[in-house]
Amino acid sequence: MLKVLKYSFYDLVRSRWLYAYLLFFLLVTTGLVYFSHDLSRTMISLMNILIVLCPLIGTLFGALYFYNSREFIDLLLALPLPRRSIFLGKYLGLAFSLSLSLFVGISFPMILFGVLTSGLLMNLLTLLSTGIFLTFIFTALSFLVALKSENPIRGFGAAIFIWLFLSVIYDGILLLVLLYFESYPLDKFALIASLFNPVDLSRILIMLQLDISALMGYTGAVFRKFLGTGTGMVVAYGALIVWVVVPVLLFLRIARRKDF
Amino acid sequence: MIIRNLHKAYGKNPVLKGVDLELKPGCITAVLGPNGSGKTTLIKCLLGMVFGQEGEIVADGKEVNRSWLYRQDIGYLPQIARFTENLKVKELVGMIGDIRNQAADPAALISLFGLEPFMNKPLRHLSGGTRQKVNILITFMFNTKYFVLDEPTVGLDPLALIRFKELLVKEKEKGKAILMTTHMVHLVEELADEVIFILEGKVYFRGDVKALKEKHNGGNLEEAIANILFLEQHA
């Protein structure tokens, strides 16, 4: 598996898109710190960017990369390698390279602007880890979709729909439900509902870490009320891990049985 | 390697309906059949890229059953030579060697097919014939027991074709078992020890070239094959 990962990584490191992604984070982070002179506020802005962008890039890049790699995968399938290694290697290769761009692109300017001595290091780490989680989750989801549908246009459509659903539609539905059933106790429902959306979970996680009640929203407030900040974060991290592991296992399972 | 009673259907569309096949050392087996008769599917089943619904594939006395280690003994030349487009030929050769983790000997083949000027070019800049030569290179540079070739001569120029035939004869003399699908009749006539003709998912004919000619009383193989295909179309 490590060899497949290595060559996928080499292949990706040559791709211009990955550098564009890195450059974007470098510029945005630098710009935000430069204009606000406030690391804490920069992090809140970055959170809002990460929560939309990481899933979107993970989704688009994931589907694109998977369809582009079909020939390479066919080549690998005829070599003495277990299928699990091939597909896990491809997945990790992409997820690592995207995460690396994100990590370097944000932490490099942050370190330059003195985050290490500011006491905000934990906040930065939370921000980065949720961004990385979102990358891993949405890359896995889009790989899963791309593997399932041979037709790239359909695959792209489905992958983008998943992104749109979890980023926008899910929240809308949840909000409607909460409004409609206003007079009932909905705390536990909201708590559980937020576990089923990785985007929401990430937002809550960062909010709990940054401790900003004003931006927390209903689900975040419920999270803190029921679980407290510490347990809340543990639960949120746990749920994010499940969100990575389940799609990856499903992806590998389908790959194991598929005809190529 | 042995294939026994292999059945494969894509959805409701049956492709192979009970095919038997054996790869013998020092023997070149040619698989013939009209377009879409399941030749490529057969080969992919052999490699574990496609899974049949029924039947078994045995390598060295053991049923393959979704394991992967047996592929160490197989060199596979796929039909469409599309690889990772950004890689240079040299890098591709290095990469396949690294992933297979087996000793490779590319130098002799590179000079045999005159690939030296292309080694530093990315694959996307190569012509179809040159790609096919690269395809041959990365298949035959390993000392595997079996070679499975899907349309190996597509796009080759006459010189490369002659070199390729010499290569096949040499490998056969080394005791390799070679399976290939092809539409090139003279290639079959010159090289094949055994011919398997697949029609509608079943083995229609099995035997040597002479027997195939006699069965269809045509003087040459091309006519015999065309005859089978014609009868099939108008059956």
Image (spheres, grey):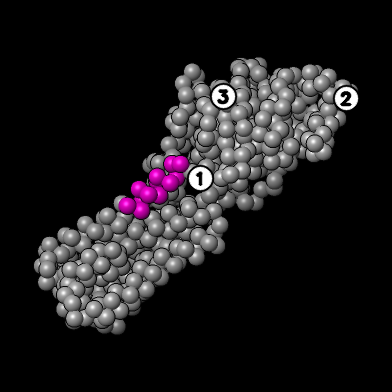
Secondary element at image label 1? helix
Bounds of the magenta segment: A246-257
- The image quarter in which residue A4 lies: top left
The C terminus of chain A: image quadrant: top right
Q: Is residue B175 above or below residue A47?
A: above
Whole-angstrom CA distance, mark 2 to mark 1, is 44 Å
- For image coordinates 43% across by 36% down, the residue present is A82
Q: Which mark is residue B223?
A: none
Give the amino acid type for the residue marked by disc 1 in the picture: Ile
Q: Nearer the viewer, mark 3 or mark 1?
A: 3
Mark 2 and mark 1 in contact? Answer it, CB < 8 Å. Answer: no
Q: Which mark is residue B4?
A: 3
The N terminus of chain A: image quadrant: top left
Whole-angstrom CA distance, mark 3 to mark 1, is 27 Å
Main SS of residues in magenta:
helix
Mark 3 and mark 1 in contact? Answer it, CB < 8 Å. Answer: no
The chain letter under disc 1 is: A
Based on the picture, tell me whether residue B183 belongs to the magenta stretch. Answer: no
Q: Which mark is residue A73?
A: 1
